[in-house]
Image: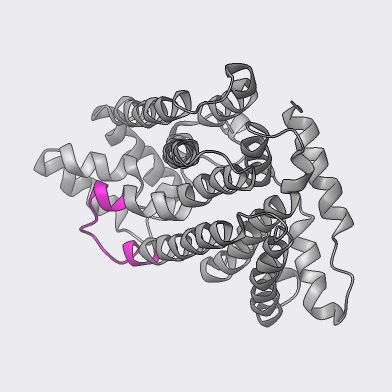
Amino acid sequence: MQTVVQLRQLYEDYLIANRFEQRPAGLYEPVNYIMELGGKRLRPVLTLMSYELFRPDVERALPAAHAVELFHNFSLVHDDIMDQAPLRRGHPTVHEHFNVSSAILSGDVMLIYVYEFLLRMSDMGCLPQLLEVFNRVAVEVCEGQQYDMDFEVRQDVKIPEYMEMIARKTAALISGSLELGALAAEAPEADVQHLAAFGRHIGLAFQLQDDILDTFGDPEKFGKKIGGDIIQNKKTYLILKALEIADPHTRAELLEHMTAETEENAGKVEAVTAILQHLGIPALAEAEKRRHQQLAFDHFNAVQTPEEKKIQLRQLTEKLIGREK
């Protein structure tokens, strides 16, 4: 079994070997730009780790891992345009560095190349299943993004709706990464489904931890200003849970803060954080995160492969859920 560091490097080498050098440069330079900005490479590594649970020749899964990372970065390019985000991974976003039209078109070609790399798995009997899973995941990610945009203008969002949104926008691709790796390794169907469910619950726990860190994290460890979600009036699990359990007076006060557009940021973050603390929201969010973590590992424990092969994937996902940045 290779270590996470080794698998990440194996993927990085494959990425460099498959750099887009063709013309027109105006189409492919933005693709190389976003793909080479770094990042955790979580999703391709998960694909490789899932494959390696069942087969040792992990290099065979590199095209599927690259397809996953291409799709992830394609979605970031288009999301950044929709969010008018100026920075991605500490660098100008693609539409800022180039222009909006180039970013849209380069994102489109990235999506097309996802299928090109999946087709490189055509010598394996699993190609139809790989395409079916990828198509389902891609649709779910788009649906999740639309729900997220819809929620920006709704004041009646409920927690089940929020959880469904992040299940699609965040968890679907984590789940799909693991599912694709297992399918490529021709794992038993039951194991494929357990890994997909494992990934889904890990993705939900991952997003809940992100919600918690954005409001209650250590700014020096988190790496960005605390309270960004509050400033942007985002309806995270923390806010929705507070609205659900607050008394009428506290609920009205929270809604007033979370619908204000001109409120001073530091004062707003302080006031909303105080309400969340008063209602015990950090502990409730942590409990919900741990619930999904337990559900995830219930599925992972059911995967029929030697326990020693699971150690690294277990440690990686535990680290993700417990991260402080």
Residue appearing at x 61%, y 20% in the figure: 311
Q: Residue 47, position in %: x, y?
A: 64, 43
Answer above or below: position of 239 versus 112.
above
Colour pattern of the rendering = one colour
Instruction: Say if residue 149 shows up in the picture.
Output: yes
**Viewport quadrant of the C terminus:** top right
Q: Residue 152, position in %: x, y?
A: 35, 63
Q: Residue 28, position in %: x, y?
A: 80, 73
Answer above or below: position of 273 versus 266.
above
Answer above or below: position of 325 versus 89.
above
Residue appearing at x 52%, y 70% in the figure: 82
- The reply to whether the magenta stretch includes residue 240 is no
Q: Quadrant of residue 30?
A: bottom right
* Viewer-nearest residue: 321 or 196: 196
Q: Residue 8, position in %: x, y?
A: 76, 39
Answer above or below: position of 12 versus 132.
above
Number of marks in picture: 0
Instruction: Say if residue 264 shows up in the picture.
Output: no
Q: Which residues are magenta?
A: 149-162
Residue appearing at x 32%, y 61% in the figure: 151
Q: Quadrant of residue 51?
A: top right
Residue appearing at x 26%, y 64% in the figure: 154
* Viewer-nearest residue: 153 or 168: 168
Q: Quadrant of residue 273?
A: top left
Task: Name the side, left or right, on which 113 lies relative to 84.
Answer: right
* Viewer-nearest residue: 275 or 82: 82
**Viewport quadrant of the N terminus:** top right
* Viewer-nearest residue: 298 or 152: 298
